[in-house]
Every structure is written in C-alpha cells, then in structure tokens.
Image (cartoon, rainbow, N blue to C red):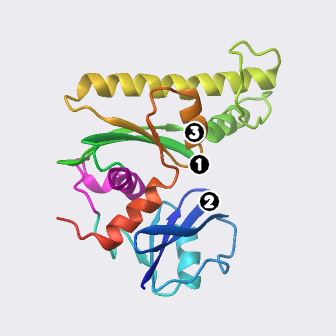
Amino acid sequence: MPTLLALDIGNTSAKYAVFVEGRKEDAGRLSCDADFTGLPGADRAVAVSVNPPTLARVREVVLGLEVVGEDVALPLPVMYHPPEDCGTDRVLGVAGAFHLLPDARAVLVLDAGTCLTATFGERDRGVVGGAVLPGPELMAWALAEGTQTLPRVEPAPVEKAIGRSTETSIRAGIQAAVHGAIRELVARCADESPTEFDVVAAGTGATALAAALPEIGAVHPDATLWGVYVAATEPAD
C-alpha cells in the first residue's frame, strides 16, 4: 500500500506524519536545527513550509520532496488580496479542518505556534481571510528585547490576572492578550459572517487554548498535516 510522508515545516519546528490509506501513523516533531536524517521513509513526500532555509535542508535529505503551492496545487480557493500572500500553511489548516469535520459549513482555525493565526474558511468558497498576531513565545521575546529591564520569561498558564512578581505579571499579560484576542476574533467573525462556523484549535498550543476557552469546539493539533494529506491525495476542483 502506498505511503505518504507529510511535513509541516514551521518557524521553529517541523511536524511530520506518515499516512497509510487515510490513517495517520508514525508522527513526530523535530526542531528546525535537526539534521532530519531520522525522518521515516515513504513512497511519496509532500511538505508545506514557512521556513525556506529549513525547507532547503530537508530537500537535501528527502529526495523528490514536493511542496504544496509549488509542485502540488492548493486544495482550496483563496480570497486573500493577493491570494499568494496567504500562508500556505493557513490554507492547509482550513483544508485539514474540513476533512476532520465533514459536517462543518465553515471554520475558524486558530493555529497556535510562533504566531497565532486565525483563518476563516467556508466549505463552498474556500479561505476567506483572517488575522495574525504574535504567539506567546514571540510576545515574551519582544518584551525582553524591546525593554531595558524586563527579563525573558517562559510563557506558562497562570490562575490569577494580578501578578505578584515580574515573571507572573508578564505571564498574566501574555495569557490575557492571547485569550482576549481569540474571544474578540470569534465574536467579530460571528458578527461578520452569516454562516455558522466551528472554532478549531490547531498547532502546538491547541490543547492548552481549548482548555481555557469554551469558544473552541474542536481540537486538532495536526490539522495542517491533514491538509497536506488532502492536497496530496484529493485533486482540487
């Protein structure tokens, strides 16, 4: 039976999975600093990437690697202006969400990684648009790099909004910024779209987001990998 190695190459890490007859197997995650020689073999390899230098290194190891948007067509239309400015990973996140939620008419995919992207898609029209904001790690980095005295803090969940130290204050601020932004985006999308939609958490921080925000109805950390699978196996209309 043919096997497909799907890769989602992000800013700091690369996720991968082998798909066999529509089943996701042998999945994992590697730092972008890895040499990638440990990737599993497959009959075909397809990637989505927002990291050209790492993609080039993966190509040296995975011979014949195909890239969505270059060698493989996008699985959905894109209504962005211009369409090519919409990250391919965001398009595949929506495609993966529709594959995993076959009854959804529309989705808002929240992908929590280095950046937090919110991408709105409708099954009948494709990717409509969305929003982009810094993820927690990027916020923490900006606070440390952009000020003279604030330390670099590892983001972590906090129970109280009133921090009693610099570290807990930064964590509380980052958490409030992310959660508040998501609530605002969900509310505004509901105002702007006549179509009911499912809110889907994807990416590394998906489970933590869903635990904190009742607005999120589905958790699919590997939605983008499933989108790679869709692009590779289901010809676009």
Q: Position of residue 186 (x, y in %)?
A: 38, 27
Residue positioned 25% across, 57% down in the render: 76
Is residue 81 toward the left or the right of residue 145 in the image?
A: left
| Mark-to-mark CA distance, 2 and 3 | 14 Å
Q: Where are the magenta residues, as a range?
A: 75-100
| Image marks 1 and 2: residues in contact by CB distance under 8 Å | yes
Which numbered tag is attached to residue 204?
1
Which numbered tag is attached to residue 13?
2
How packed mark 1 is, by other alpha carbons closer than 10 Å (few <14, some 14-19, many 20 or more), is: some
Looking at the rendering, which quadrant does residue 13 occupy? Answer: bottom right
Between residue 86 and residue 178, name the one nearer to us: 178
| Image marks 2 and 3: residues in contact by CB distance under 8 Å | no
Q: Is residue 94 magenta?
A: yes
Residue type at tag 3: Gly
Name the magenta segment's main secondary structure. helix
Residue positioned 24% across, 70% down in the render: 235
Query: Where 186 falls versus 53 (above or below)?
Result: above
Q: Quick check: can you spot residue 69?
A: no
Which numbered tag is attached to residue 135?
3
Looking at the rendering, which quadrant does residue 106 occupy? Answer: top left
**Quadrant of the drawing holding the C terminus:** bottom left
Query: Where 51 falls versus 39 (above or below)?
Result: above
